[in-house]
Image (cartoon, rainbow, N blue to C red):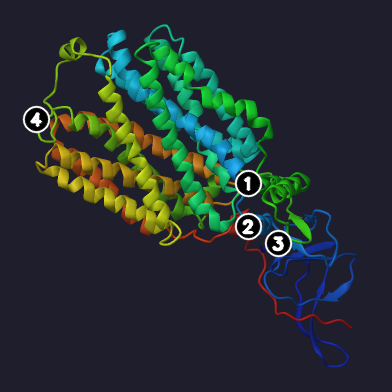
Amino acid sequence: MAERIAQVPRPHPHRTTGDGAAHSHVYYTDVIMACRSLDTLWCLRGGSRSSLFFSGQFCGKHANSKVAGSSPGRDTFTVDDALEAVGFGKYQWKISLYAGLSWIADAMEMMILSILGPQLHCEWALLGYEVAFITSVGFIGMGVSSPLWGHLSDKYGRRTGLIFFVVWTLYYGLLSSFAPRYHWMIILRALVGFGVGGAPQAVTLFTEFLPVKARGKSVMLMGTFWALGAVCEVALALLVMPTLGWRWLLGLSVLPMVIFVLLCHWLPESPQFDVLRGRCDKALKTLKQMAKDNKKSLPKGRLICRNVQINRGRIKDLFIPQYLRTTLLLWFIWFANAFCYYGIVLLTTEMFQDGDACGTTQVMKSEFTCRLGCKDLTTKDYVDLLWTTLAEFPGILLILLGIDRIGRKNSMALGFVLFTLCVLPMYGCIGRVSLTILIFVARAVISGGYQVVYVYTPEVYPTEVRALALGICSSFAKLGALLTPFVAQVLLRSSVSLTLSVYWLCSLLAGIATLFLPIETVGRSMQERAAEEEAGIESTPSTEHTH
């Protein structure tokens, strides 16, 4: 890692000494120089005149850069070196369970919306737009809060952000079960959505505990927790709704968050973040515990600790030349993922609404008929919903097999292209069975591709803005989720062909956008700081002269 050197005069090129030998001399004034390419810390102090040639890149943030417990000539290692040494083991499995609990909770709160809407539609005699608004306010809350949770996690820690998100969602999720009327439900579900906007920070935390080789598949496996949470919510509704009602369903759905809060005292902070904060002792303690649990040894030497980074989590850092194109493309890719994913979920019920219309929907119904015709979800409805949700598992498995072989970018592009190919045959009269298969496959591939972008985004950004970048990307996803009902439910009633055209075109453009991402992150170590800061000083030839 190349970093700036303070108070170092430029060397005079080829100054000749008395014996005629050419040397390059550098005068140092109270300088500490870290040569990371050699994994060795060289300390030169006291205004002495020295000659130094070395291989690799010059490193050292400022004159007061430090290494925890460092001494001249001793070997050093970084957090990434330690993660590679200890590998993936028992410690990472424990972290995945904690992060997974938050994702299960996220999925359950999202799935509640598809179950709660029909019930309140009948019980409170709501209009169609009022039912839709219960879903919309949740997405609005998520979109507003995601960057805020990201900034909180970059400034105060991944652990802090994750715990705050869970406690917030638990509190307002439980309160929503006591909502006396519609307006209270709207307010409380908006606050629940505000909390759920912090769910992506679980991925940020988990990613920073993973070695390079295990990162892709491990983060992809996090997607199974989301699918598991969705399945659990449908199963819970099947048991609770017929007897206890929707209030008990809302109350019992917070159980994963209760478990998380009871166990969160064990959850460690990311060692990557601790090093960025200059808390090397805490980072080293975490790494030692990781090595102990995984029955491995840390690299020999001292852990390199950087200067405390004060300006963390700044939005403007996402727009430096190094990340500008990546940022803009990822915003569209996240938007398209959510737009297509939630679109196919809504199209499932809409296109099955009229069984004899061969994949088309009924003409606009009157609101009066909708009110009189409302009914509770039946066992068959829950079973169909369960089957639709199970489509996510094969999608995750498909992408899991290719994410490290063909790369992150190609995996995302594959998901979008396959989704496009599944949508195109829906223009024709293909029958109920064929339509069911196409929707099943479309949901499988788009959900798998959605998980890949969760892998790619934390890998491509440095530690100082990683959580913020993920949070803002998540906001664009929520924008896509917020807009897709107007296409899948409103536009569909006017033109099925136009609706399908919007989805396959959006998916195709997103697939092309992934190929223009400038960085492929397979095998790439996690960065601490933007490379623009690290561009520091040019390399120097590798020789040392003393006289």
Question: Residue tagged by mark 3?
Answer: 4
Is residue 197 something one can see in this rendering?
yes
In the image, taking residue 227 as reference, residue 417 lies left or right, namely left
Percent across and percent down for residue 406 are 40, 62
Give me the disc on residue 356.
4
Percent across and percent down for residue 334 are 39, 44
Above/below status of 472 relative to 287: above
Give me the disc on residue 90.
1
Q: What residue is rendered at 45% in x and 26% in y?
A: 193
Contact flag, marks 3 and 4 (Cβ < 8 Å) = no
Contact flag, marks 1 and 2 (Cβ < 8 Å) = no
Above/below status of 227 relative to 441: above
Residue type at numbered disc 3: Arg
Residue type at numbered disc 4: Asp
Q: Nearer the viewer, mark 3 or mark 4?
A: 4
Q: What residue is rendered at 27% in x and 32% in y?
A: 346
Q: Secondary structure at mark 2?
A: helix
Above/below status of 21 relative to 201: below
- Looking at the image, tell me whether mark 1 or mark 2 is earlier in sequence order: 1
